[in-house]
Image (cartoon, rainbow, N blue to C red):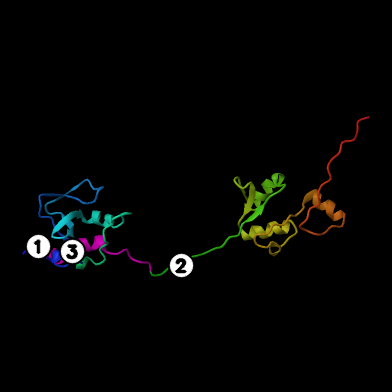
Amino acid sequence: MNRYDTVWKNPTAHYFVERSKEKSRDCGEFRCKKAIFNGDLCVGIADGAAMSKWFHCDCLKSSFFYRGRANKPISEAEKVAGFDKLSEADRETFRTVFQPAPKKSSGSVTLKLVTQMQLTGDTFDMKDELKQYGCNWDGNAKLWVCTDPAMQAKLCAKFGLELKDLAPGAAKTVPFGETAAAEDANGDDEVGEVKPKKPRTEEPKP
C-alpha cells in the first residue's frame, strides 16, 4: 500500500506530512533557497495521483498568504494525512507551526472624535501666542490648527466667544486688537462681522 493512498482516496485531505524519505527535494516556496533533505519534516500537496510539490512546514505556511494562487490554509493539523504516523515530538512541532493565531478575548478600545479649529487672517503677529494655545501651523493649508478641546475653549474666550458659538463647519470672523477697540467705540457690539477698512489716501504735497 502506497503511503500516500490516504491523500489520493480523500481529495479533501489535500496535504500529506512526513519525514522526507528522499535524498533531496526542492521546496515549493519560490523564495526558499534550501533543499528538503532526507529526514526533514515536510508537507506535500496532492495533485491527482502524485505529490506535485513539497514544502518545509514554515514555507508552506508562507504560501497561505500569496496574493495569487495561495495554498489553502491548514486549520486543523490533526486532520492532515500522515499526521497519525508522526512521532509525538513531530506532531507537536507540526501543531505549533499551523495552529491558528490566538484571538484576544478581552481588552479596551478608546475612540475619540476630534474637531479641528482653524484660524486664518491676521495671525502673523500672534504666532507665538497661538503656539501657547497649542496651535500648529499647517503649511499646506496656510492656516493655524487647534485640536485640543480645552485650548479651543480658551481661544474662544480670548476672542469673546464660547465654543458653542461655533457651529461645526461654520466660520466666524472676530475682530481683535485696535480693530475691535475701534468698533467698540462706534457702538458696534455684534461679533462675526468686520467692517471694511477705508483705503488710505495720501495728502497732496504742498
- Real-space CA distance between mark 1 and mark 2, rounded to the nearest whole angstrom: 50 Å
175 left or right of 37 in image: right
- Real-space CA distance between mark 3 and mark 1, rounded to the nearest whole angstrom: 18 Å
First in sequence: mark 1 vs mark 2: 1
What is the magenta range?
80-104
Image point 84% across, 55% down: which residue? 184
Q: Which type of secondary structure does the marked residue at label 2 adopt? A: loop
Image point 67% across, 50% down: which residue? 130
Furthest-top residue in view?
206
Image point 70% across, 47% down: which residue? 123
Q: Is residue 103 magenta?
A: yes
Image quarter (top left, top right, bottom left or bottom right) of the C terminus: top right
Tell us which disc is closer to us: 3 or 1: 1
Q: Is residue 126 magenta?
A: no
Question: Which residue is labeled 2 in the image?
Answer: 108
Q: Are marks 2 and 3 in contact (CB under 8 Å)?
A: no
- The amino acid pointed to by label 1 is Arg
**Most foreground residue, 51 or 190:** 51
First in sequence: mark 3 vs mark 1: 1
Question: Which residue is labeled 1 in the image?
Answer: 3
